[in-house]
């Protein structure tokens, strides 16, 4: 099966267009177990550790089934990386999707034009025609996945599903054939309906936010420290499934509108709106505290932290901000800070 990879800080890549073109969309994720050998000659030492890790893998060579990669406008770091991908990564098809920073009407038209350009370049490169009807069919499938994930996510809240297990499911949804994903999610829902809450020591209810957090081992580490992630606003989490795409209108307009109206990430404007969604989640899920994780050198998160710190202090919700390297050794080094946070909440 042929695949299109997407490198995306904010899950704004139109998976439905790749599906309509006959490809399986695969989100490119990091691997915290590898060393950075080849990438250092291309990026400065202060480059985001996660984006650097994905680039390292791409320079070494991606899965040969991946026939091209689309980078979607995200943070300055991923944006600037695109030129390096063109220079240093051996792929025949690379496209930079210019997802707008703003969310007004002009931004919508701008985004629509770039989606059309993406379609045109895929059609030219792979000698195919992307039919509108096929995009509509793909939207139906991805919407079912979104609805299923949203339903399953609630089992975290009732302490039936571990936050780490849910995180694995979202990752699986972003990196596999969507019909296969639907089958897995359907079976999971049947299984969860029969399960009782786990009876371990009372865990602290946490809202997890921050940069890309794609290493499930990190969530397992948090669970060892007594935290259950009951809610999140992550790209491997709620931002991937919170809303659905309208099915009864022009599919390209529907896709563009969907991406410009879903929960906001810090790479978009006005970034402080992100707080409103976090506040809604914190209140709805009655969390004991908020953990905000920034990948080392993730500027959007570094700029967000003072504002979020102030706003959550005003609300009286315990909040901790941690900037960390992208390797598992780091989790052990951070143990004391998380243990101290567990004690105060
Ligand atoms: S973790 Fe931060 S700096 Fe790195 S790619 Fe994501 S938004 Fe950009």
Image: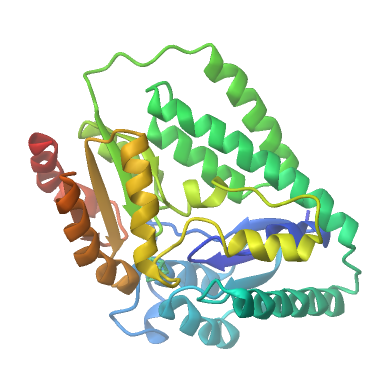
Q: Quadrant of residue 82?
A: bottom right
Q: How many marks overall?
A: 0
Q: Name the quarter where the C terminus is drawn.
A: top left
How far across and how far down the image is residue 14, in percent?
67, 62
In this orientation, which residue lies closer to the viewer: 228 or 336? 228
Residue 162 location in percent, x, y? Answer: 39, 29
On the picture, is 123 further left or further right than 219?
right
Residue at 75% across, 44% down: 141
- Residue visible at 38% across and 59% down? 274
Relative horizontal placement of residue 241, taking residue 196 as reference (left or right): right
- Image quarter for ligand 1 equals bottom left
Q: Position of residue 35 (x, y in %)?
A: 36, 65
Q: Specify the quadrant of the image occupied by residue 92.
A: bottom right
Q: Nearer the viewer, residue 32 or 233?
A: 233
Q: Is residue 86 left or right of residue 293?
A: right
| Residue furthest front as drawn | 105
From the viewer's perspective, is residue 26 above or below residue 126?
above
Colouring scheme applied when the structure was drawn: rainbow
């Amino acid at each position: 099966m042929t695949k299109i990879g997407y490198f995306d800080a904010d899950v704004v890549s139109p998976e439905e267009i790749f599906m309509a073109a006959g490809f399986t969309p695969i989100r490119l994720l990091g691997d915290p177990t590898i060393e950075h050998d080849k990438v250092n000659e291309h990026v400065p030492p202060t480059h985001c550790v996660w984006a650097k890790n994905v680039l390292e893998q791409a320079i070494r060579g991606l899965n040969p089934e991946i026939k091209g990669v689309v980078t979607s406008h995200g943070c300055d770091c991923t944006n600037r990386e695109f030129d390096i991908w063109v220079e240093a990564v051996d792929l025949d098809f690379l496209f930079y999707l210019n997802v707008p920073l703003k969310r007004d009407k002009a931004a919508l038209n701008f985004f629509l034009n770039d989606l059309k350009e993406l379609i045109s370049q895929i059609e030219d490169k792979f000698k195919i025609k992307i039919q509108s009807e096929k995009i509509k069919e793909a939207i139906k499938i991805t919407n079912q996945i979104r609805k299923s994930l949203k339903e399953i996510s609630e089992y975290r809240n009732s302490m039936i599903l571990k936050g780490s297990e849910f995180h694995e499911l979202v990752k699986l949804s972003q990196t596999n054939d969507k019909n296969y994903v639907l089958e897995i999610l359907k079976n999971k829902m049947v299984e969860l309906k029969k399960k009782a809450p786990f009876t371990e020591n009372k865990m602290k209810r946490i809202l997890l936010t921050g940069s890309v957090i794609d290493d499930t081992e990190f969530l397992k580490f948090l669970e060892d420290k007594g935290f259950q992630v009951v809610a999140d606003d992550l790209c491997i989490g709620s931002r991937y499934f919170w809303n659905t795409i309208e099915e009864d209108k022009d599919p390209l307009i529907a896709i563009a509108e969907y991406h410009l109206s879903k929960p906001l990430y810090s790479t978009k404007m006005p970034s402080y709106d992100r707080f409103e969604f976090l506040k809604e989640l914190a209140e709805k899920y009655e969390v004991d505290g908020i953990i905000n994780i920034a990948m080392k050198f993730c500027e959007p998160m570094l700029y967000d932290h003072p504002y979020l710190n102030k706003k959550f202090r005003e609300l009286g919700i315990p909040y901790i901000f941690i900037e960390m390297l992208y390797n598992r050794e780091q989790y052990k080094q951070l143990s004391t800070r998380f243990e101290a946070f567990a004690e105060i909440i």
